[in-house]
Amino acid sequence: MRILSLSYEYPPIGGGGAPMCQGLSEAMVSAGHEVDVVTSGMKGLPALEERRGVKIHRVRCLRRHRHYATTPELLTTLVPLYRKALALHRERAYDINHCHFAVPSGVPSYWLHRRTGLPYVITCHGSDIPGYNLDRFQWEHHLIRPVWSRIVRGAAALTCASRFLTDLIHQRLDVPVDVIPYGFDPPVFTDAPRQDRILTATRMFERKGVQFLVRALQHLDTHFEVWIAGGGPYLPELERLAAKLGVAVRFLGQVPHEELMQLYATTKIFVFTSAVENFPMVLLESLSAGCAVVTTDTSGCREVAEDAAVMVPPEDPMALASALSALLEDEARIAQLGELARERVARFRWSRVAGEYEALYRRCLGDTTLNRTAETR
């Protein structure tokens, strides 16, 4: 099968949706399919690259930051993505287009479908759904709601990784949604001693809730170091808050992925305090490393971690402080959570997830025989 994938973000650009697109693309190549990805370019990145069998085509657009983009920058991706996708389809005659993010990537996917008839599957990741992101893109979603609805209704299939996001979609449109989790193949971690450290890693937006961890530290009496990894527009506010409260926090800024993996492997406790999530990759990564995880009992966080983590209410620094205090005094519980974490992540192997997507593609293309074969994997 020849698969065209459109995603305005692809590693090293972007957040949680980007590595999901990468992982699925590579898994599809491993399954014997051909995959071309059309994505945003950025200074310092090649226009054409092949990684693990995936051909990555980067188009010229405006983008200043690797971890987030502004609305005007997103608008500059639409026409270049469409033109490149159209040229590639004329050359290679793809069977299906997998579009990541209903917007902005759905716009060129919809244009391509109208021009050529190429069916497209949309995977929604969160911020492309109205009402998901309360601190970004609200007015944009209000303005484009008719366009968004047309793009979603025009898809051959619509997928997302969590029941939470499915419910949010159904508040806007009555359309079928296939819930398929993100895949994750745990890396091989080196055996290294774990440090008395509390770590969080995320893109720095207000809705990620890192401010509640900073506030919780006022109520903790511990020798554990607290490290915060990640960049973004909310980072200066967090630094000011920590200084104001007089709490000891080490802000690392943006950390390369390989270094972040090593941080997970040498950290005892990982905290993720986001209020709204679809299927957070940082939880999969920290669980796979055997960290004792504390996260919010909301949205996709519970769906990822379930009983392998300590759950706290969102936006509640006192509850977070209480959970951390109990965990800091119980090394046996920290070790137990680490074992549960590794067992939990084993359910999300890419080979299994890719099989679900292959079955979905076959269904969209009307190939029921191979669809049944894929479902038995």
Image (spheres, rainbow, N blue to C red):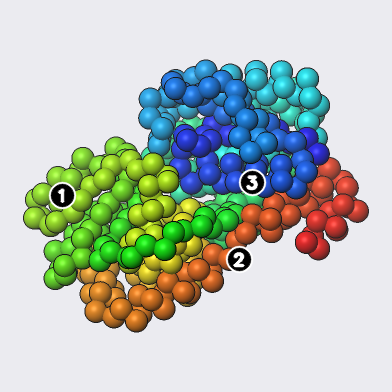
- Residue found at the very far right of the displayed protein: 369
Q: CA distance from mark 3 to mark 2?
A: 16 Å
Amino acid type at mark 3? Leu
Residue at the image position 48 percent from the left and 53 percent from the top: 281
Q: Earlier in the sequence, mark 2 or mark 1?
A: 1
Q: Secondary structure at mark 3?
A: helix
Q: Secondary structure at mark 2?
A: helix
Residues 262 and 36: in front is 262
Residues 113 and 46: in front is 46
Q: Earlier in the sequence, mark 1 or mark 3?
A: 3
Q: Position of residue 158 (x, y in %)?
A: 67, 47
Mark number displayed over residue 241: 1
- Asked if residue 259 is positioned above or below residue 120 in the image, the reply reads below
Indicate the quadrant where residue 211 lies: bottom left
Residue at the image position 23 percent from the left and 69 percent from the top: 321
Q: Position of residue 177 (x, y in %)?
A: 66, 53
- Asked if residue 228 is positioned above or below residue 331 in the image, the reply reads above
| Direction from residue 342 to residue 263 in the image, left or right | left
Check disc 3 and report the residue beneath it: 24
